[in-house]
Amino acid sequence: MKKTYKIEVDCANCANKMEEAAKKTPGVKDAVVNFMTLKMNVEFEDGQDIKEVMANVRNNCKKVEDECEIYL
Amino acid sequence: MTEYIINGLFIIVILMALGLLVYSRNPQSNMTNKQRKMLLRILVATIFLLVIELLPSSLFEGRLGYLFNLTLYLIDYLIIGYDILLKALKGIKNKQVLDECFLMTLATLGAIALALYERSSDYTEAIAVMLFYQIGEWFQSYAVGKSRRNISDLMDIRPDFANVEIDGKLQKVDPDEVAIGTIITVKPGEKVPLDGIVCEGESSLDTSALTGESVPRDIKAGDDIISGSINMSGLLKIKTTKEFGESTVSKILDLVENASSRKSRSENFISKFARIYTPAVCISALALAFLPPLISLLFNIDPRWHDWLYRALTFLVISCPCALVISIPLSFFAGIGAASKEGILVKGSNFLETLSKTKIVVFDKTGTLTKGSFEVSCIHHSKLEDEKLLEYAALAESSSTHPIAQSIIKAYNKPLDLNRVKDVKEISGNGITATIDNKEVAIGNDKLMKNLNIEYIPCHSIGTIIHIAIDKNYMGHIVISDVIKPNAQKAIASLKKIGIQKTVMLTGDTQKVAESVGEKLGIDSIYSELLPNDKVDKVEDLIKSKDSKAMLAFVGDGINDAPVLSRADIGIAMGAMGSDAAIEAADVVLMDDDPLKISKAINISKKCLRIVYQNIVFAIGVKLLCLLLGALGIANMWLAIFADVGVMVIAVINAIRTLFTKNL
């Protein structure tokens, strides 16, 4: 299961940090943050509650970069 | 002297900020409110700083004056850096100690503390570091935002609406909501929103956004029409054949927009580097602050604590890997954008990287180097005017549906008066005899001429030979062959020029035809009479025998060669408009079928990668140099922050250079 989310982030390194944070979130198989198009592609592990996982992803991203946003 | 330089610098900053603020009123500037606010802060903080610098020093005499001085500087420090301080605090709360805001805070507060300790009252440096850091961030945010928009505009072929007649009135509808089989109206100047068939109207289409081809394409009722092209002249009514999600335009958009998500090796290298770089610099800073003084103590030398501490703080100023991290994805994004403007769709940054290392190009013949359609290529030994000969041939063939007959009729390209033709007899495998203008006309191959006992001149040309005899007199022959694309020879030559080591042609055609085409084009090796499976084997052989660093590209028209496209290091499909299988299997899609675009694509990729490497080497080089000079005490914080911001500005500007592809 793959989904794409629109994001808001100011610097490229912060985008990389968000990608790392998203990858480490349980339930996420892989994540790619595209700083230029401001999009996050998330691949979920099977049988996950996507809403819950994404809420965690958002929290984890906020921890590494306070001023970021993921539009769920 | 230094004071004059510094004050001059502040004046420059003030003027620039003012200019930009005025410019920001222009709606074209596309400045966000956040950016405008930051610009204002930069302006206020710099003016304030300049005023403090210029106040007479008599004001700051005595204990009270000292405190007054400190307060003024701190206020300015807060104006320019309060958000950084806040973010640093939040970073600590979230256990993100190596956050760049935290490090900037540490560096600047440390510099202020040192100034307090030394009672030097030199706080300007700390504030300047914050100020220029903010200027750098501002520039980055503005430049990236601006190029993001510009590049997206390049790729913008998204139609906003479709005109559908509802209750007798034309209404604008979201293309997503239009069902298959709906009749939509496209007015002149509008984008075609969905794929379909023209059912009414005549016009010419501008397909340049899709193919990079600037010559308009004529279209009339009954023709297929592809979404994303622009209707230039007449009103068109179109019956849609696909939903929006399946239409050419959304497929292309999807492809291009997601292309930069497939990251290249350089991007991955940089993000890994960035992850190590900041901690490494911080640890070195820590070591620099404590090790040399402690060692000095051991040997009973003056430890010079504040000196080493200052050098350590200088390290922190250079600890942000921003310049590197921003310029690489920006270059790739610009490269993909520039290519798509030329009608070259690159499906990922990684493919742009592979493309730049291409050394062997393997071509499929039919449809790639040749047009794949039969055409009259020449007329030999004609005893009549060529035109006249062709007219007889076309008349004789006028009732035939054979592709060769069609190509003759097409070559004649004038209305045929069928009343002139009588007694048409088709002799299977031989040709046709007919009576035209009361003359006996025979048209066909060698066999037909032999059967009719007509002496003919055999032809040495490659292709299908059609002899013509009138009243048993030999009149000459027409040669029909698959035609080489007009740019094919130029394409091969330009590939050679840009350093492609080997060109190969694979074809299912006969050896004679293959060799003649290959020779004309100057292709290095030719493999003919191959079945589709043999092509995969051949490509595999070629991959095995080449140097592992040299990449092999396969160019095909996407028909029957999907397995080869995916087997090659990089698969290039051409003329792929509307062919889903080709778009799926290939890594690079050429929207039109001009083989000259191959060398253009490689050139764009090379330029992009060259800029990427320049930026990597330049940014890492300058940073390391600054670290070294900082450790030796030669570079102060001023130099550090200038180097840092300067490198970023130059790297970003260099990255944007990828967009210009005119002379490639």
Image: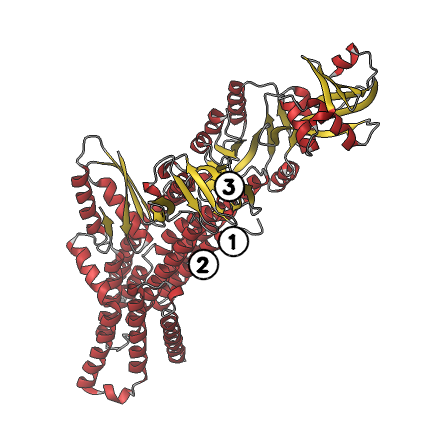
- What secondary structure is found at the residue carrying circle 3? helix
Report x, y in % for residue B636. Answer: 35, 67
Image location (x, y in percent) of residue B128: 32, 71
**Crowd rating for badge 1 (residues with CA inside 10 Å; few <14, some 14–19, many 20+):** some
| Residue nearest the viewer, comparing B617 with B599 | B599
For the point 21% across and 60% down, which residue is it?
B87
In three-dimensional space, the C-alpha distance between marks 1 and 2, rounded to whole angstroms, equals 12 Å
Label 1: state its secondary structure. Answer: loop
Badge 3: few (under 14), some or many (20 or more) residues near its Cα, within 10 Å? many
- Give me the disc on residue B308: none
Mark 3–mark 2 distance (CA, rounded to whole Å):
21 Å
Which structural element holds mark 2? helix
Q: Output the chain of dot 1.
A: B
| Residue at 78% from the left image edge and 14% from the top image edge | B449
Q: Is residue B205 visible?
A: yes
Query: Which colour scheme appears in the figure?
Result: secondary structure
Q: How many marks?
A: 3
Circle 2: is it few (<14), some (14-19), or many (20+) Cα within 10 Å? some
Label 3 marks which chain's residue? B
| Amino acid type of the residue that numbered disc 2 sits on in the rendered structure | Ile
| Up/down of B305 relative to A40, above or below | below
Q: Are marks 1 and 2 in contact (CB under 8 Å)?
A: no
Q: Left or right: where does residue B479 sit relative to residue B593?
A: right
Q: Quadrant of residue A56?
A: top left
Q: Which mark identifies residue B356? A: 3
